[in-house]
Image: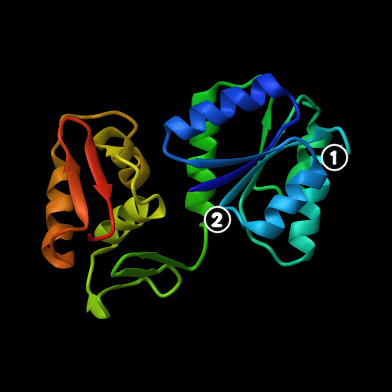
Amino acid sequence: MRVLLVEDAPGIRRFLVRGLSEEGHRVIEAEDLASAERLLAREPPDLIIVDRMLPDGDGLDLVRRLRRDGSRVPSICLTARDRLEERVEGLRSGADDYLVKPFAFEELLARIEAVVRRVGTGDVLEVGPLRIDLAAHTVEVDGRPVELTAREFDLLVALAREPGRVWSRTRLLDQVWGIQFDPGTNRVDVYVGYLRKKLGAGLIHTVRGVGYVLRART
């Protein structure tokens, strides 16, 4: 997933870039509103993480402008401002979540996953021959319709939102089934097997000892 990170504190920015990159995201960096606007015009991201207190203004103004222009790109505001009215202002201005500094990186990851689940990153996902229409709840491979159960669809969407990222079984249990611990079940493996039968070979790959990854056929 392409993430636009707008943060003026170099230490925090480096920490977040490293952590998000290790999670498989491609991070685009900006240190102020002006550079963020230039990057947005060049390459729209899938998610924006923006600090409120920037050298040239309030990061929330960027979110407001995007919403006025009709953009639905998910956004998370970071801030040291922890007063209730300021958090409410952020959410009412169009931010999808609001995280107060200091925060644990794992919490940010959880917020990202929740926002992407709730808001989505577009109506159609395409990975090689695979096409997923999120609004119509349909799947095609090489133009051929594929019938999936609701759970199979959710699992495929989780993998397709970040093609190339290796998902552990524990993370997939949390993302798709809402199970936040590994109960020792082979549920993920069974459903991946269902998907492979329906989608055909060459899309979902096993990374031994780690989990699964969706890649376009080569």
Classify residue 42 by image quadrant.
bottom right
Q: Which residue occupies 37% across, 43% down?
A: 175
Where residue 4 appears, x then y in whole percent?
A: 63, 44
Separation of marks 2 and 1 at Cα, in angstroms: 23 Å
**Residue 60: in sight, yes or no?**
no
Q: Residues within 10 Å of mark 2 (few under 14, many from 20)?
A: few
**Residue 38: in sight, yes or no?**
yes
Q: Secondary structure at mark 2?
A: helix
Disc count in the image?
2
What numbered label is drawn on residue 58?
1
Q: Nearer the viewer, residue 124 or 111?
A: 124
Position of 5 compared to 86: left or right?
A: left
Position of 88 compared to 106: left or right?
A: right
Classify residue 51 by image quadrant.
top right
The residue at which mark 2 appears reads as: 119
Nearest to the eye among marks 2 and 1: give it.
1
Q: Secondary structure at mark 1?
A: strand
Where residue 17 appears, x then y in whole percent?
A: 56, 30
Q: Is residue 214 above or below residue 56?
A: below
Q: Amino acid at mark 1?
A: Asp
Where residue 91 appears, x then y in whole percent?
A: 73, 46
Q: Residues within 10 Å of mark 1 (few under 14, many from 20)?
A: some
Q: Which residue occupies 26% across, 46% down?
A: 213
Position of 60 compared to 114: left or right?
A: right
